[in-house]
Image (cartoon, rainbow, N blue to C red):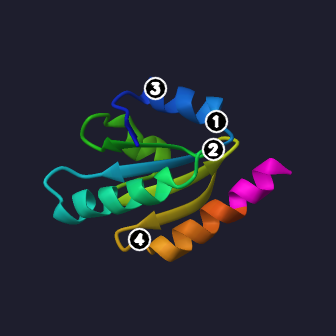
Amino acid sequence: MKHLTSIIDIERTIADNCLCLFYIKAPDCGVCNVMLDKVGKLADQFASLASFYTDITEEPLIAGQFLVYSGPTVLLLMDGKEVYRGSQFIDLEELEYNINRFLTLSEQ
């Protein structure tokens, strides 16, 4: 997963890719760091999935623009629109199911 720190880079990545996985973590959050590794390994299984993460304190505009107020939060965006959101207790099986589902839709 790429580490993006500016809202401009985040918006560009979302605009340039059909399907994106965006992971948002909070500072000093042990669960966020553990889940980042797990979500990153899951994302690595999908070559056509653009995956990136940021720390919510690195770019304060993220909270307002994506309505994220706690970490960890994972967003799946298709054609720039949110199609899945997981927050705090991220179900990796559900996330994998949704990645597969929306990758299939994006390939049609």
Residue picked out by circle 2: 48
Residue picked out by circle 1: 17
Closer-to-camera residue (62/75):
75
Which residue is pictured at 28% across the width and 43% down the height? 55
- The kind of secondary structure element at disc 2 is loop
Marking on residue 9: 3
Q: Quadrant of residue 96?
A: bottom right
Estimate how packed mark 1 is, as few (under 14), some (14 to 19) or many (20 or more) residues with alpha carbons within 10 Å.
some
Q: Position of residue 5 (x, y in %)?
A: 33, 31
* Identity of the residue furthest to the right in this view: 108
The disc labelled 3 sits on which kind of residue?
Asp
The disc labelled 4 sits on which kind of residue?
Ile
Query: In the rendered structure, are the residues bearing label 2 and label 3 in contact, judged by CB atoms less than 8 Å apart?
Result: no
Closer-to-camera residue (49/21):
49
Residue picked out by circle 4: 90
- The kind of secondary structure element at disc 1 is loop
Question: Which sits earlier in the primary sequence, circle 2 or circle 1?
Answer: 1
Residue 52 seen in the figure: yes
Question: Which sits earlier in the primary sequence, circle 3 or circle 1?
Answer: 3
Which residue is pictured at 23% across the width and 57% down the height? 33
Question: Which sits earlier in the primary sequence, circle 2 or circle 3?
Answer: 3
Query: In the rendered structure, are the residues bearing label 3 and label 1 in contact, judged by CB atoms less than 8 Å apart?
Result: no
* Identity of the residue furthest to the left in this view: 28
Query: In the rendered structure, are the residues bearing label 2 and label 4 in contact, judged by CB atoms less than 8 Å apart?
Result: no
User: Residues under labels 2 and 4: Cα distance?
Assistant: 22 Å
For this view, does 8 lie left or right of residue 38? Answer: right
User: Residues under labels 4 and 1: Cα distance?
Assistant: 23 Å
What is the magenta range?
A: 102-108
